[in-house]
C-alpha cells in the first residue's frame, strides 16, 4: 500500500468515525444549554469536528422528528429571530443511554491497547 492509498483509507475511516459520533456530540451540546444551529456548528468546529450547514440541518431535523429534541424561536439582538434547540425528556434519556454506550465502547477500545 503506497502513501496515497494509506492516506485515502485513513481519511475514509476518520470520516466514518466522525459521522458515527456527530449525532451524539450534537445531543451533548444541546443537553448542556439551549443552542442554535450556528452555535452548534461553532462548538463542533472548536472540537475539531468540522461540519457545514448542509450536514447539521438534516441531523437536527432527524433528531426533531425522532422526538429527541425540540425547538423554539427567540428574538435576537443582532438580527432575525433564532431557532434554539433543547432536549426533550426522551432526548435526555436517549443521551444518557448514548453516554453509557460511549463509556462501554471507550473501555473496550482501551482494553486492546
Image: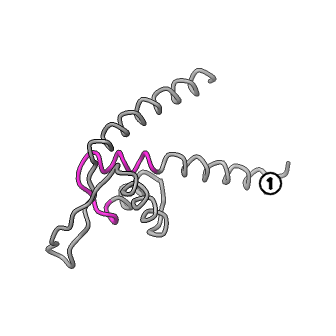
Q: Which residues are magenta?
A: 23-39
> Dot 1 lies on which element?
helix
Q: Is residue 64 left or right of residue 6?
A: left
Give residue 43's quadrant in the image: bottom left
- Residue at the top extreme, as displayed: 111
Count of labels shown?
1
Disc 1: which residue: 5
For label 1, the crowd category at 10 Å Cα-Cα, with few meaning under 14, some 14 to 19 and many 20 or more, is: few
Taking the spot 56% from the left edge, 25% from the top edge, the residue there is 110
Closest to the observer, 25 or 3: 25
Dominant secondary structure, magenta: helix
Where's residue 102, x and y in %? 47, 33
Closest to the observer, 1 or 107: 107
Q: Quadrant of the C terminus?
A: top right
Taking the spot 35% from the left edge, 45% from the top edge, the residue there is 28
Where's residue 27, x and y in %? 36, 48
Closest to the observer, 54 or 51: 54
Give residue 91's quadrant in the image: top left
- Residue at the bottom extreme, as displayed: 79
63, above or below 104, in the image:
below
27 drawn magenta: yes
Taking the spot 28% from the left edge, 56% from the top edge, the residue there is 70
- Residue at the right extreme, as displayed: 1
44 drawn magenta: no
Q: Is residue 19 left or right of residue 46?
A: right
26, above or below 95, in the image:
below
Amino acid at each position: 500500500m503506497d502513501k496515497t492509498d494509506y492516506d485515502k483509507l485513513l481519511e475514509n475511516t476518520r470520516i466514518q468515525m466522525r459521522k458515527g459520533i456527530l449525532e451524539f456530540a450534537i445531543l451533548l451540546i444541546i443537553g448542556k444549554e439551549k443552542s442554535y444551529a450556528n452555535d452548534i456548528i461553532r462548538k463542533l468546529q472548536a472540537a475539531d469536528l468540522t461540519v457545514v450547514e448542509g450536514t447539521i440541518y438534516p441531523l437536527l431535523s432527524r433528531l426533531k422528528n425522532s422526538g429527541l429534541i425540540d425547538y423554539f424561536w427567540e428574538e435576537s439582538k443582532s438580527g432575525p429571530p433564532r431557532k434554539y434547540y433543547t432536549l426533550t425528556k426522551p432526548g435526555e434519556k436517549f443521551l444518557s443511554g448514548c453516554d453509557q454506550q460511549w463509556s462501554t465502547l471507550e473501555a473496550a477500545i482501551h482494553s486492546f491497547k
